[in-house]
Amino acid sequence: MSQLSQKHLLGIKNINREDLELIFETATKFKEVINRPIKKVPSLRDITIANVFFENSTRTRLSFELAEKRLSADVINFSSSTSSVKKGETLLDTVNNILAMKVDMVVMRHSSPGAPHFLSRHVDANIVNAGDGTHEHPTQALLDTFSIHQKYGSLEGLKVAIIGDILHSRVAISNIFALQKLGAEVMVCGPNTLLPKYISSLGVKVELEVKEALKWCDVANVLRIQLERQQIKYFPSLREYSLYYGINKQLLDGLNREITIMHPGPINRGVELNSDVADSDHSIILEQVENGVAVRMAVLYLLAGVN
Ligand code: CP
């Protein structure tokens, strides 16, 4: 069996193209499995996985849990809001206590950038980053690029615009790395205040006008405004943001060609994306969710083969 070059999935920045292609190849096989009447395979029987979430999640947590169950792993779920973290326990103590129960892999979401990297230096289990603050969200980028790959057959030469709150987005950063490694051209678009100053040093095009970004791209990955990470006002109001950056059917109709609309969720309907776009034939948002399970099955299965 081909193996990943890494024991952990901490981010996309340090992963190589061969690893990405191996994950896609494996995810394609698992996508077939989850569309069969019997959706379960015994690949991770006797492997125990802890989903350790220190930050809110719907899609990622459920998708990992389903992926683990489809692979026949034993699964335990930890949520910081109902745990002894509230009594002052450290991250390392919490995880070491979970690992003492003979857990093999840890899927972790944390609000602090670098938390899964810290953990990977101190414990033996395979660590999967399920989103660390504003840093990276590797499995989201894998499922996004896998979804584009499924639709177009290849990302080579494809133009992908990432539109919205780039400043606070781990999804944007992981997507930029994955898209570039797979040969796509990347543009970011948003108000100046929501674009990090370093962004052009990542080799992406920068555009302030959403209409121009839509004219340029084959695929638009639309991000939400992350109000929970904003301590100051980056734009006057959500109404004004929606007026200048919201994507609606009228904008897409004006392009005179088809583009694909993606969104990692959760969508703020009527802010960054109108329902007439989110629910239209342009959108592959629910395919992204389906592909997320197959991609996470691939990641867990491949990591389990690396000690
Ligand atoms: N896309 C994503 O990470 O969604 P959740 O925050 O619901 O997991």
Image (cartoon, grey):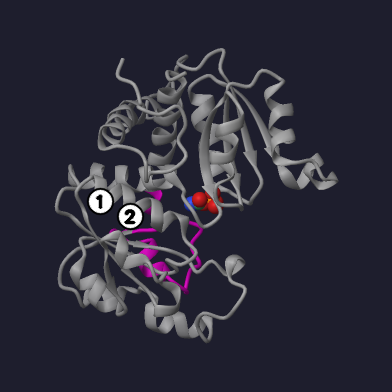
Q: Residue at x 30, y 42 (%)?
A: 146
Which residue type carries mark 1? Gln
Q: Quadrant of residue 125?
A: top right
Confirm whether residue 282 shows in the render: no
Query: Up-down: is 168 above or below 246?
Result: above
Point out the residue furthest to the front here.
121
Horizontal arrangement in the rendering, residue 55 relative to residue 235 (left or right): right
SS at circle 2: helix
Q: Position of residue 167 (x, y in %)?
A: 46, 67
Ligand 1 has an atom within 8 Å of the beta carbon of the residue at disc 1: no
Q: Residue at x 19, y 63 (%)?
A: 258
Q: Is residue 263 within the magenta segment?
A: yes
Point out the residue furthest to the right here.
87
Horizontal arrangement in the rendering, residue 108 relative to residue 79 (left or right): left
Q: Position of residue 191 (x, y in %)?
A: 40, 78
Where does the magenta region start and end?
A: 262-286
Query: Up-down: is 6 above or below 274?
Result: above
Which residue type carries mark 2? Ile
Task: Identify the image quadrant of the N terminus.
Answer: top left
Q: Quadrant of residue 159?
A: bottom left
Confirm whether residue 90 shows in the render: yes
**Observer-nearest residue: 115 or 161?**
115
SS at circle 1: helix
**Observer-nearest residue: 126 or 21?**
126
Which residue is label 2 attached to?
Answer: 176
Cβ atoms at labels 1 and 2 below 8 Å apart: yes
Q: Position of residue 230 (x, y in %)?
A: 58, 71
Q: Residue at x 81, y 47 (%)?
A: 86
Horizontal arrangement in the rendering, residue 102 relative to residue 64 (left or right): right
**Observer-nearest residue: 211 or 37?**
211
- Residue 180: mark: 1
Q: Position of residue 17 (x, y in %)?
A: 26, 37
